[in-house]
Image: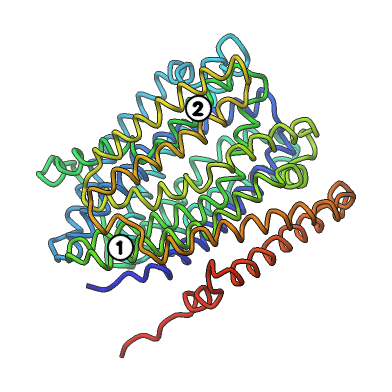
Amino acid sequence: MKPIRLMSGILTVGFWTLASRVLGVAREIIILALIGPGPVLDAFVAAFRLPNMFRRFFAEGAFNAAFVPMFSKKYEAGDDPIKFARDAMNGLSFVLLILTALALIFMPALVYATAGGFAGTDRFDLTVGYGRIVFPYIFFISLAALFSGALNAAGHFAAAAAAPVFLNIFVITAMVAAYYAGGDVVTALVWIVPLAGVAQLALVSYAADQAGISLRPGRPRLTPDMKRLTRVAIPAALAGGVMQINLLVGQQVASNFEKAVGWLYAADRLYQLPLGVVGIAVGIVLLPDLSRRLKAGDDTGGQAALSRAGEISLALTIPCAVALVVIPLPMVSVLFQRGATSSDDAAAIAMAVALYGLALPAFVLQKVLQPLFFAREDTRTPFVYAVWSMLVNAGLAIGLAPVLGWVAPAIATSVAGWVMVVLLIVGGRRLGPVARFDARFRRRLWRICLASALMGVGLLATTLLLGPLLVAPGWRYLALLVLLIAGAIVYGAAGQAVGAFRLSEFSTALRRRPRKP
């Protein structure tokens, strides 16, 4: 077995995911500047969320949870993993073609089900039109996720992690070109989405060919392996996509409030930056590693992998969460307040950012804990937990909306995130020692929290010092950069001083080991 280097894999995926999420924030900056919160942005967000929601079900949720462990075990045992992957690709393609056709036909019903508050307004017709253009994106991106899963299981992480960069590059280029050419920016934005999906699929399929995972289309076959994959994937689709479902519930509630869908979308994109860089990277690398270790009966190695993944996740996300809660307005105003986005819009987005920030560690911990079940091909347990989490989310979002208004979905999403984590931790106890964090993790956790709290104090003090510069045209970008760098320095120094981590650990992880001759 060629071992998967956990930390190196996390950093590789994290680097490319960081590039994708930074470009994603740049994409939102341009969207908010050129389109701005309002009916058009609400319609695009609701339309674009449809293929992304189903992508979590049919691709990243189901295939990272079901396909990757099965492929990893066949890859490890030499049991013709290519044939298995080819059958999975053909079956997935068949399902996706049917789903896309049905969605295009019944798009008005789909929009009503996910954004009922748009009914009777211009936003509804806009969303239906945009939805029919962007929905085919799901076909290309879902197949790209399958190729990515196969690459990850084989220990090749770079191409799969780099593919999402294409979407943001294509979108940014199309919007800027349309703006300077005097064209309709939102039309360019909508039409470029499926084209970006084609580019992503082309990249990962080429990388898979180069890695010896050559898959060619053919007739779908219902083999015993495909029946097993389906049986595992159906509950995994819901368990892996619970966050998307919660966001959709929030969108349904927010659609009843003017501009709220756009505000929550912008806030979601900002907290997705650290979530994607850390949580998703950890989940992608940890799942095949745990699958292999469990196959080999290495419970000790599995516990160590889980603990180190949890440790690095929280060491990077708890300070990010503190920053999102402590200084949301400076970040949002500098990044998004321009053009069609007003100061009132920035204040609303900042409130949602702070609420989401409270649950950032929970969202990341879900990515760390779920592979414990998925690696055993147990997707039913996370499915049950996901149902409870969704019930909490829906109850709070709908129940609080008449009292708290449009912020109710953000509060509900955050509470539901922590409920899911508690259920995963309690339920994981029956899996034995491999599902429990080790002594080093517990020893460092409170130190990470202490260092993050000290960083929060430093951020507040620095914000007071830089206050005038943070609102000064031209200077505010530099001021925000100084603010974030100051926070990072305080956290790094405090973390090293209290023993939350050793900075040398990160440099060691970045250093490549020499190849054996």
> Looking at the picture, how far across and down is residue 259, in whole percent?
67, 24
Question: Label 2: few (<14), some or many (≥20) within 10 Å?
Answer: many
The answer to whether 509 appears left or right of 149 in the picture is right
Question: Label 1: few (<14), some or many (≥20) within 10 Å?
Answer: many
**Relative vertical location of residue 115 with respect to residue 59 in this rendering, above or below:** above
**Relative vertical location of residue 454 with respect to residue 489 in this rendering, above or below:** above
Q: Which of the 4 image quarters holds residue 243?
A: top left
Q: Residue at x 41, y 24 (%)?
A: 104
Q: Amino acid at mark 1?
A: Gln
Q: Residue at x 67, y 58 (%)?
A: 454
Q: Amino acid at mark 2?
A: Gly
Q: Nearer the viewer, residue 409 or 56?
A: 409
Q: Nearer the viewer, residue 161 or 73?
A: 73
**Residue at the outermost top position:** 120
Q: Residue at x 46, y 38 (%)?
A: 417
**Relative vertical location of residue 24 with respect to residue 4 in this rendering, above or below:** above
Q: Earlier in the sequence, mark 1 or mark 2?
A: 2
Q: Residue at x 81, y 58 (%)?
A: 478
State the separation of the CA atoms marked 1 and 2: 44 Å
Looking at the rendered image, the quarter that the C terminus falls into is bottom left
Q: Which of the 4 image quarters holds residue 190?
A: top right
The answer to whether 307 appears left or right of 397 in the picture is left
According to the image, label 1 marks what residue? 303
> Looking at the picture, how far across and down is residue 435, in whole percent?
29, 55
According to the image, label 2 marks what residue? 131
> Looking at the picture, how far across and down is residue 396, in whole percent?
50, 23
